[in-house]
Image (cartoon, grey):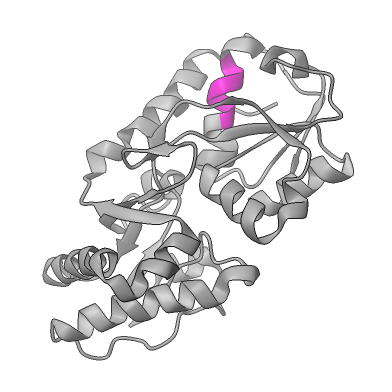
Amino acid sequence: MIVSLPMYDWTECEHLTNAWWRGIRQELIKQGLTSVPKSLLRTRSDSDAWRMPDLLLSQTCGYPLTHDYANDLTLVATPDYRVEGCANYQYQSLILCHDRSPNLTLAEFKGSTATINDVASQSGFSAFRHSIAPLAQGAAFFERVTISGGHRYSMAALQSGDADICAVDPESFALAKRYVPGLTQNLRIVTTTAPAPCLPYVTHASSQEVARLQHALFEACENPALEDVREQLFIGDFTFSSRSDYERILDMENDAIALHYPDLT
């Protein structure tokens, strides 16, 4: 079995992600689940881990869940985060710019440089595209769009002036503000995107083990010994959502396509 929790596993808070997994692991052991990994897998790419048949637990973005991994991953639960921009197990991406920008509205960024974390990202790409589509009117909106490789790098591009605008999920913004404050200094929220379900916990395990994982997550959220870890990672609690909850992501994509804006350009 392997476990990977890559979505918010920043170097600055790896020790907290480790502690969070240890708490979940203890709850799984209490239920009699044997051979539970002691450590998180960090030596493979996210996509490699998500395809491994012995994946016990991971977290993915909603966009891969509804696209490349729609037939591969089983949904376990959806977290809620105690940060601005998250509520009721949904989040709205924060569309950011630097304070040096004179632009106040999204429409004013026409002809500027945007950066996205990845084309397979709901928060940094697809939700952003959904917000731009009505303004683009089927034509290119930005002069240039770059790929940063991660939300923290998108914020760094705003700081350096290499990009004018980007979209990040509110959990990433909160982590940066707490652990890498230089990334968020002088950044401003232009607007927010439409909401989508928070990034799901997933597995390749059997239905019996899914039930155990769900119970373990619930118990870990109730464990007083993990309260400080949860607070430092902004983890609230979990809901046992269904695939249909994530169809909102497909709806947002189809909305943009219907407006003749299939790509962020």
Among the 4 quarters of the image, the one containing residue 109: top right
Left or right relative to 243: residue 124: right
Among the 4 quarters of the image, the one containing residue 34: bottom left
Identify the magenta region: 128-133
Residue at the extreme top of the image, as rendered: 137
Q: Is residue 132 magenta?
A: yes
Write the residue at 64% across / 69% down. Answer: 12
Residue 113 place in picture, x, y as percent: 81, 30
Q: Is residue 178 magenta?
A: no
> Height in image: 191 above or below 217?
above
Write the residue at 83% across / 44% down. Answer: 159
- Residue 95 seen in the figure: yes
Residue placed most toward the observer, 239 or 255: 239
Left or right relative to 129: residue 85: left
Residue 260 place in picture, x, y as percent: 56, 15
Number of marks in picture: 0
Quadrant for the C terminus, please: top right
Residue 91 place in picture, x, y as percent: 43, 38
- Residue 55 seen in the figure: no
> Height in image: 144 above or below 180?
above
Quadrant for the N terminus, please: bottom left
Per the picture, the main secondary structure of the magenta-coloured stretch is helix
Left or right relative to 144: residue 263: left
